[in-house]
């Protein structure tokens, strides 16, 4: 199951996402939490210790994703390696065993 949390700024998305992730993990589900906020703080909300937080950086999308175009010209993105490998290489594991990836971050002034 995939759950996406989006909405108005400051409405509690990160708090809800982190809480859901930990509750599902405590119930025995294998949970991966992906933060795509340009100012990522999901890992903090999940309660990762400082040494684990330092491991997280923007995931180099060009290294883990490839675009494929089907016979009808429809493009789609695919992982170039198993998701577990991506978590091991670029992610961290927090309380209750939740795996977390920060997809992006502050790239610099005026860089989107
Ligand atoms: N149910 C709640 N009751 C009271 N305060 C809350 C609740 N949920 C979140 N907050 C507080 O509201 C603030 C914003 O929450 P949060 O960071 O989760 O929102 P967000 O939607 O992720 O924000 P952003 O758009 O900046 O990413 C935080 O200080 C958080 O502690
Ligand atoms: Mg947020």
Image (cartoon, rainbow, N blue to C red):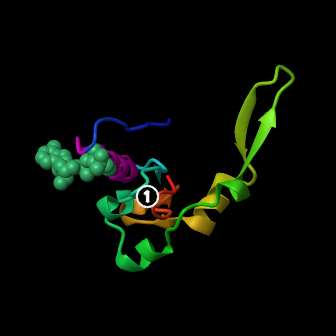
Taking the image as drawn, is residue 15 in sight?
Answer: no
Which residue does the image show at 40% across and 58% down from the upper left? Answer: 40
Residue 24: image location, x then y, percent: 37, 46
Which residue does the image show at 50% across and 58% down from the upper left? Answer: 101
Q: Tell which residue pokes out farthest to the right in this image.
A: 71
The range drawn in magenta is 10-27
Residue 111: image location, x then y, percent: 51, 57
Taking the image as drawn, is residue 64 in sight?
Answer: yes
Residue 85: image location, x then y, percent: 66, 61
* SS assignment at label 1: loop
Residue 52 falls inside the magenta stretch: no
Residue 20 falls inside the magenta stretch: yes
Left or right of 97 in this view: 84: right
Q: Nearer the viewer, residue 25 or 13?
A: 13
Dot 1 alpha-carbon crowd within 10 angstroms: few under 14, some 14 to 19, many 20 or more: many
Which residue does the image show at 83% across and 27% down from the upper left? Answer: 70
Main secondary structure along the magenta-highlighted residues: helix
Q: Tell which residue pokes out farthest to the top in this image.
A: 72
Q: Tell which residue pokes out farthest to the front in this image.
A: 110
Residue 91: image location, x then y, percent: 53, 64
Q: Tell which residue pokes out farthest to the bottom in this image.
A: 51
Left or right of 8 in this view: 80: right
Q: Is 96 situated above or below 52?
A: above
Q: Is 87 situated above or below 54?
A: above
- Residue ID for mark 1: 98
Left or right of 60 in this view: 54: left
Left or right of 58 in this view: 44: left
Q: Nearer the viewer, residue 1 or 75?
A: 75
Which residue does the image show at 59% across and 60% down from the upper left? Answer: 59
């Amino acid at each position: 199951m995939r759950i996406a949390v989006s909405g108005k700024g400051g409405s509690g998305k990160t708090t809800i996402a982190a809480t859901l992730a930990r509750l599902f993990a405590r119930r025995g589900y294998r949970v991966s939490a992906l933060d795509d906020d340009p100012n990522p703080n999901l890992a903090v909300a999940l309660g990762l210790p400082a040494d684990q937080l330092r491991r997280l950086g923007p995931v180099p999308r060009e290294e883990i994703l490839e675009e494929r175009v089907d016979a009808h010209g429809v493009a789609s993105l695919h992982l170039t390696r198993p998701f577990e490998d991506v978590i091991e290489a670029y992610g961290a594991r927090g309380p209750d065993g939740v795996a977390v990836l920060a997809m992006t971050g502050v790239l610099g002034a005026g860089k989107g």
